[in-house]
Image (cartoon, grey):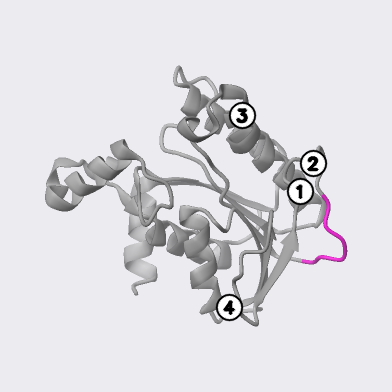
Amino acid sequence: MNKKTVIVAGSSGLVGKEVVKQLVTDPLCKEIILLVRKSSGLKDEKIKEVIFDFTASDYSIEQTEADVMFICIGTTMNKVKSKQAFEDVDLHIPVKLGKLAHKLNIQHVSVISAMGAHEKSTFFYNRVKGNMESHLISMKFPSLTIVRPSLLIGDREEFRFGERFAEKLYHALPFIYPSKYEPVESSSVAKAMIYDAFNTSTGSLNIMENKKIHEISRNHLKS
């Protein structure tokens, strides 16, 4: 299998950090291009940083060739404080990244969405995620994977009381969560995304639900 050049957007986030960490040691990855607002300080012979303006109305990168794009962008209402600001991050940025992927002729795009995402959802969060999914699907990439995790577990930089409480509850009483809603480690999401990107044929749309994330991580990429 040919080695891949990968673009990662959102490399400072919970899942994005894991994606980069795992790509660095993945023999199928040739180069990792990080789209960053400012230098991350990450040092590895595979890593190339591109200072990127995510607020721009249209995205472009000069002289860049890549096979895969991972879109790991996301925020919370608590952080941005308004619905418009939330849409700017969780809807408009991924859509503009999708358009960039088209310009670069990228063969596989993988984006993190959320369990329950639907453009007609009565819940604002799920509706925004559903709208984002619909926009990316309409772009008709050679291969697109939409990842819908349940509660994400991992080392967050910001404190989120509800998620921290649910995480502790899961570790103490894992059996109370039905398998469909089982919380998932950010490292497991990253593993599933990478495995899928490097092993999925073109011409496919893959909706990876939470249960499938667990399955791929456990069966194919045991650490």
Q: Are marks 2 and 1 in contact (CB under 8 Å)?
A: yes
Judged by its main secondary structure, the magenta piece is loop
Span colored in magenta: 60-65
Q: Are marks 4 and 1 in contact (CB under 8 Å)?
A: no
SS state under label 1: loop
Of the residues tagged 4 and 2, which is closer to the observer? 2
In percent of width and height, residue 81 lies at: 53, 27
Q: Amino acid at mark 4?
A: Leu
Of the residues tagged 3 and 4, which is closer to the observer? 3
Question: Mark 1 — residue?
Answer: 53
Query: Considering only order in the chain, which callout, 2 or 3, is on the residue closer to the N terminus?
Result: 2
How dense is the environment of label 4, judged by Cα within 10 Å: few (below 14), some, or many (20 and up)?
Answer: some
Query: Considering only order in the chain, which callout, 4 or 3, is on the residue closer to the N terminus?
Result: 4
Query: Considering only order in the chain, which callout, 1 or 4, is on the residue closer to the N terminus?
Result: 4
Question: Mark 2 — residue?
Answer: 56
Query: Considering only order in the chain, which callout, 2 or 4, is on the residue closer to the N terminus?
Result: 4
Q: Is residue 6 above or below residue 43?
A: above
